[in-house]
Image: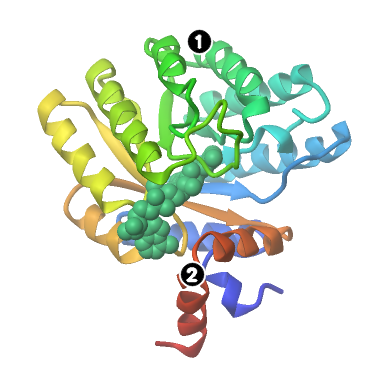
Amino acid sequence: MIPPIARRFVAGESVPEVLDHVYECNADGVAVIVNLLGEHYDTPAAARDDVDTYLSLLDDIADSDLDASVSVKPSQIGLDVSADLFEDNYREIVARAHERDAFVWCDMEGADTTDATLDAFESIAEAYPWSVGQCVQSNLKRTRDDLERLVDVPGEIRLVKGAYDEPSSIAYANKSRVDEAYRDDLRFLFEHRDRGVAVGSHDPAMISLADRLAQEYGTDYEVQMLMGVREDAQRDLAAQGVDVAQYAPFGDKWLSYFYRRVRERKENLTFALRAVAGR
Ligand code: FAD
């Protein structure tokens, strides 16, 4: 069982628990992006198990009237085995989403996976337009070129600052430089796309910038934040009419995810402890 301290960031261990969480978020006007926790599988069978869970989740979502999508990790669905296995599995999941009028996001992992991930996204989005979205990371120096390459691809783009430590030869290390790159990339997306822009950030400055850019360019966008982080802001933005989606992980591999949240921001532990104490 997940201890209450981790429940702030993880929606449960089972599919029924995460679907209950979706139902509660939807009641507040917040959509949910469901992620089954798991990564770096080194056998096709382990990847297959999670692919099957995603396929059945997509059916559950399509059979309900829930406002939800799923988000997969490349190394969860086969990339550590081979690029071909990853692409086949990614395609199968998106094909099901396309058939059921549902939606699939793909997270972005370390920089050694960027090429394979974007190649697969480009090809799958062309085959199943507007059924898939890809995360890209502004801390990588290559990202502006990637955004130019993806500009006409019929899939959504989630822009994040980037969560992986990368060498300074390929990534900006300084926080203010990452923020500057994020602002530039966000402007590029709003300027060059008329739909399918997702602002994957808790940063009030980036969310205000997105609002200004939407007014300037008339682009539709969505704000995406993690479960357990600025949930009041998620509800407030939704109440103001902004499209908001919460990324909610679930599954039995919750421990390392919880540690990551606490490591990246010590206040998260305080928040979680307060939640346990009921204040
Ligand atoms: P930061 O630069 O960390 O913080 C800026 C400001 O935001 C802070 O000063 C504060 O005002 C506010 N803030 C940030 N965190 C908190 C908090 N816990 N509580 C209160 N206020 C806070 N990274 C990847 O590399 N690959 C992915 O696929 C990926 N997917 C993601 C999906 C979503 C929906 C989100 C939200 C993030 C994802 N990330 C991913 C993580 C991302 O790259 C960043 O590491 C993470 O979001 C922190 O950056 P930030 O823009 O939120 O704000």
Q: Which residue is mark 1?
A: 126
**Residue 139 in view here:** yes
User: Which quadrant holds the C terminus?
Assistant: bottom left
Is the residue marked 2 within 8 Å of ligand 1, measured from its CB?
Answer: yes
Residue shown at 70%/64% (left/top)?
255
Q: Nearer the viewer, mark 1 or mark 2?
A: 2
Q: Which residue is mark 2?
A: 268
Decide which of 175, 120 is in the foreground and name it.
175
Q: Amino acid at mark 2?
A: Asn
Q: Which numbered disc flags the more N-terminal residue, 1 or 2?
A: 1
**Inter-mark Cα distance, 1 to 2:** 39 Å
Indicate the quadrant where residue 15 lies: bottom right
Decide which of 137, 253 is in the foreground and name it.
137
Q: Amino acid at mark 1?
A: Glu
Q: Give left or right: position of 246 versus 37.
A: left
The colour scheme is rainbow
